Amino acid sequence: MSDITIYWRGWTEKQLASYQQNQGSTNHCGKYAAASVLNLLYGTSLTGDSMVDWLNGRCLKGTPLYTIFGNNNGSFVFQAANLIRRLGQLNGLEPTVRSRKGTLKTLMENLQDGNSLSIVSVTYFQDNEPVIAFGKNTSSSLGVTRWVGGHLMILGAYDPQHRNTEDLPTPWGFLSSWPGKDLLYWMSENDFQRSWGRLSLFNMVTVTGGKREGETR
């Protein structure tokens, strides 16, 4: 990978991390990622909770357009894209949202584009989970996996100089819907590449900011 350090928009880790929301012990990472990605692009204050509540009032709790089955079992990548589109529409925002099978080059291009963000999917089997660690920690923040698991996060940084407390490189920095507010969640090159989109038709969503409803540019 590149030796260039990139933090989205040149923001500090703390600035980026301040946009993280906490999904608690739920499987609502897609809803929280949708809210955070729009907040980053538009400076809004949307919440994942608002999407959870909205879906609870939909037919079949949003299945299959927004959720895997019901409103408690997470979302596939294409469903996360639909969540972003709908949340934008509900709040007068018009982002360009694309589900795709991206590459590392795609991720780096989006990271360098201050008007685009990548939501990535990591998937894994029980006992083969990747380590996604808060800050410089070495223990993973992933919850308990049944037999297969997945998680959606926003790529916020690529920093080849970032190392954990065991002095191992963890260059991939993500905004995740977990409790941390001051630091990002980081992955090693190996853990990220072996779990990124492993069990998914699409492995990412590209979100590009557009105009607000009624706005002319």
Image (cartoon, rainbow, N blue to C red):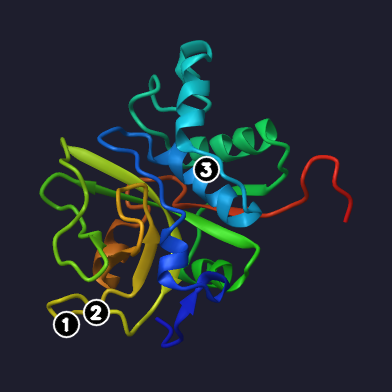
Within 10 Å of the Cα at label 2, are there few (<14), some (14-19), or many (20+) other Cα atoms? some
Q: Which amino acid does label 1 sit on?
A: Asp
- The answer to which quarter of the image holds residue 192 is bottom left
Q: Residue at 24% across / 64% down in the picture? A: 191
In front: 43, or 81?
A: 43
Quadrant including the C terminus = bottom right
Q: Is residue 108 above or below residue 144?
A: below
- The picture places residue 95, in percent across and down from the top left corner, at 68, 48
Q: Name the residue under label 3.
A: 35
Secondary structure state at the residue bearing disc 3: helix
Secondary structure state at the residue bearing disc 1: loop
Q: In this view, does 53 lie above or below 118?
A: above
Query: Disc 2 to disc 1, how far (Cα)?
Result: 5 Å
Quadrant including the N terminus = bottom left
Q: Residue at 16% across / 82% down in the picture? A: 167
- The picture places residue 170, in percent across and down from the top left corner, at 27, 74
Q: Mark 1 points at which residue?
A: 167
Query: Disc 1 to disc 3, how far (Cα)?
Result: 34 Å
Does residue 72 appear left or right of residue 130 in this picture? right
- The picture places residue 11, in percent across and down from the top left corner, at 51, 72
Q: Which amino acid does label 2 sit on?
A: Arg
Q: Which mark is residue 163?
A: 2
Query: Disc 2 to disc 3, how far (Cα)?
Result: 29 Å
Dots 2 and 1: beta carbons under 8 Å? yes
Q: Give the residue at the far right of this rendering.
A: 216
